Amino acid sequence: MSALDLPFDTDAMLAGLRPWVECESPTWDAAAVSRMMDLAARDLAEAGAAVETVPGTKGFGTSIRATFPHPIQGQPGILVSGHMDTVHPVGTLDKLPFRVADGKAWGPGIMDMKGGNYVFLEAMRQIARSGMTTPLPVTFLFTPDEEVGTPATRGLIEDAARGQRAVLVPEPALPDGGAVIGRYAIARFDLVTQGRPSHAGWALKDGRSAIAAMARRILQIEAMTTEDCTFSVGVIHAGQWVNCVASECRAEVLSMAKTQEDLDRGVAAMRDLQGVEGGVEFIVTRGVTRPVWEPQPGTMALLDLAQDLAGRIGFDLTSDRAGGGSDGNFTGAMGVPTLDSIGVRGRGLHTLDEHIDTASLVERARLAAGLLTRIA
């Protein structure tokens, strides 16, 4: 039997995926993410893997590393790298419950990226049940902090990827179903304006509003966006009393750059904004960064194999570089052959319409099984 002929079943996969989707796991809720990891660890163990729980750091949840038995365990093999955190706060299920209708399935995190992670686990489960052995050892690493730039587990991912023959990242497929073979750099910045407090009614003119100053800076920052380097302010925190002139405002910026040169210019432009203006100090601190990942020969060889498998399954697998970051940025930038966004098809990730095309569960499970049994 070929791996492409394994008995994958959509209804069975939906039944297995549902508990994952209903175990809400927003990044900043370490306990919730760790509960999700426990659930995935149970399923990985039932599929035959030896599972190790890696304690969380920096306030984030745990990670899990699962190794499947293999005659050459310990030698270079395949790393399946995925994250279990989502952007949806606990309680999102009330507005976005798990449901299936008209060839789609909805739920928080089902597309990004619990669906893809589950697909690869199911592929390994079916490979083991069939009596097949993958040519190379297979390790799964699920981490808790990708949605905020992977500040705690980048080193864990890089250590797991170092020396491997291939890294497979089941992030959701591109809109046309394609895979990602390179990604732009992603940089984050923390902004602070520090003004002077005063009573907003009795002594307004004595104050220097950190909020007003930040508002002006936001317009200035977002106006720096070009086709090659974008800037977007996504978080703002300030103020406690409406009758007080705010003395501090904090914000966060996400920047995307197509090349390292674009990134360096963007970082310099952000730093040049620092200083004091109108009695308000503006402070810029660079946060976590995802490096530029350029397509390399090893990645292109993985793509060739995946495209051959896709053709045999019955679909065309396109490829492209992508602006959105993932943990594939790290492994790809290391030079480890990395194939990203080979998870499920869907729409609406990070929204209350997040859903997958249910037919893509079997499609992508066959692709996963083909890759796991053909990469050598």
Image: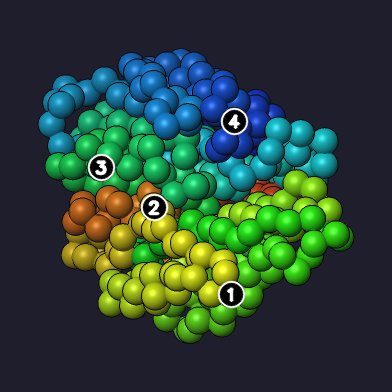
Tell me if mark 2 has few (under 14), some (14-19) or many (20+) residues whose alpha carbon lies within 10 angstroms of its own.
some
Say above or below: 309 vs 154. below
Q: Which amino acid does label 2 sit on?
A: Val
Is residue 361 visible to the viewer in this orientation of the structure? no
Q: What residue type is labelled 4?
A: Asp
The CA span between labels 3 and 1 is 45 Å
Q: Which amino acid does label 1 sit on?
A: Gly
Q: Earlier in the sequence, mark 3 or mark 1?
A: 3
Give the camera-side residue of 225 and 273: 273
At mark 1, the secondary structure is: loop
At mark 4, the secondary structure is: loop
* Of labels 3 and 2, the one closer to you: 2
In the rendered image, which residue does mark 4 sit on? Answer: 29
* Of labels 3 and 1, the one closer to you: 1
Q: Which of marks 3 and 2 is nearer the N terminus?
A: 3
Callout 3–callout 2 Cβ contact below 8 Å: no
Mark number, residue 351: none
In the rendered image, which residue does mark 3 sit on? Answer: 158
Q: Decide if residue 205 is on the left or right side of residue 80.
A: right
Say above or below: 135 vs 178. above
